[in-house]
Image (cartoon, rainbow, N blue to C red):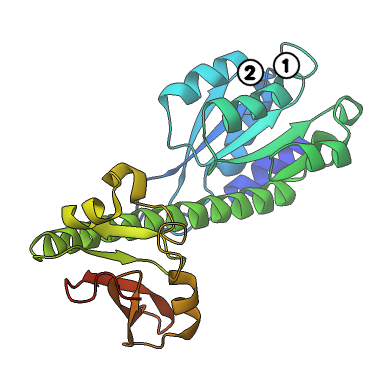
Amino acid sequence: MTSDDALLQFAEAGGADEETGPPWRVLVVDDEPDVHKVTELVIANLRFQGRGIELLSAYSGAEARRLLERERDIAVILLDVVMENDAAGLTLVGEIRRNLGLNAIRILLRTGQPGQAPERKVVLEMDIDNYLAKTELSADKLYTALIAALRGYDDLRRIEAYREAAYAQMRDQIILLERVLEAMPGAAGITDGTLSLTAANPPFFEALGAARDALIGETLEDRLPGLAAARSKAADGAVVVVDGFRMRRYLTGDGRLGGFILVESGADRGRG
């Protein structure tokens, strides 16, 4: 039985689960048309999390780069090393990661000439997920590598979505906090656990003699020298006076000590 026959047999044995979402997009980059045909046979019936595969093809590194500039939701690339030149695939890896900024996409490097790209050197120096020698690539190995790559891509996209949701929630909270602070008559602000200023009202910036852009996100330790000492002593809910500002320590959502809510009091200015 030839390797192509084995791959075809494997593809025909695949299941046909009901689709539960759009197909995963897999890009094959190889200058040999037969590689595209055989790969299509192997993954035609592949399913992961109830989703099938949409196969895209490019026959050179340059063609793949143009495709990736407009198609940003590709999950996995099966990438040949030697195409229009001996290092076309390796060059494309650098383009994908550095210039195109596609960090979630998983890259499976395939080569029929391992000497052109020694495995250890490539794995250490290039941001790829697997190194597959075509001469040793059975249907089972390709299936396993693809599933692992799809799982990795899905995990990264989930993390990215959670992070974006957290950032959006944080922005909403900061906006609400700034509105509350602006309604307060005296200088008021809030720091995080590192004593960096996260929000404040105009009187607070005036009291410290600095513009908003110069203070938001910056630590207040240099401008309020007593703040670091207060952090080491103050417990949750404790009110301290540092450099004329009354401050209340607060707990974060996970129960850890956070930063300070700062409220200026005219009677306390000048004390400390």
Residue furthest top in the image: 84
Front residue of this view, candidates 123 and 227: 227
Q: Amino acid at mark 2?
A: Gly
Residue 216 image offset from top left, x and y in percent? 33, 51
In the rendered image, residue 227, in percent from the top left (x then y), is placed at 43, 70
Q: Residue at x 48, y 37 (%)?
A: 74
Q: Is residue 179 above or below residue 212?
A: below
Nearer-N-terminus badge (2/1): 2
* Residue closest to the eye, 69 or 9: 69
Q: Position of residue 93 (x, y in %)?
A: 66, 29
Which residue does the image show at 49% across and 54% down from the upper left? 154
- Mark 2 neighbour class, 10 Å CA radius: few under 14, some 14 to 19, many 20 or more: many
Q: Distance of mark 2 from mark 1, alpha carbons? A: 7 Å
- Residue in front for this viewpoint, 244 or 155: 244
| SS class, disc 2 | helix
161 relative to 137, above or below: below
Q: Is residue 224 left or right of residue 107?
A: left
Res. 1 visible in picture: no
Q: Marks 1 and 2: in contact by CB < 8 Å?
A: yes
**Percent x, y of residue 183:** 7, 63
Q: Is residue 35 above or below residue 54?
A: above
Instruction: Kindly identify the residue that appears in the image at 33 percent across and 87 percent down.
Output: 238
Residue corresponding to mark 2 = 61
Quadrant of the image for the C terminus? Answer: bottom left
Residue denoted by label 1: 83
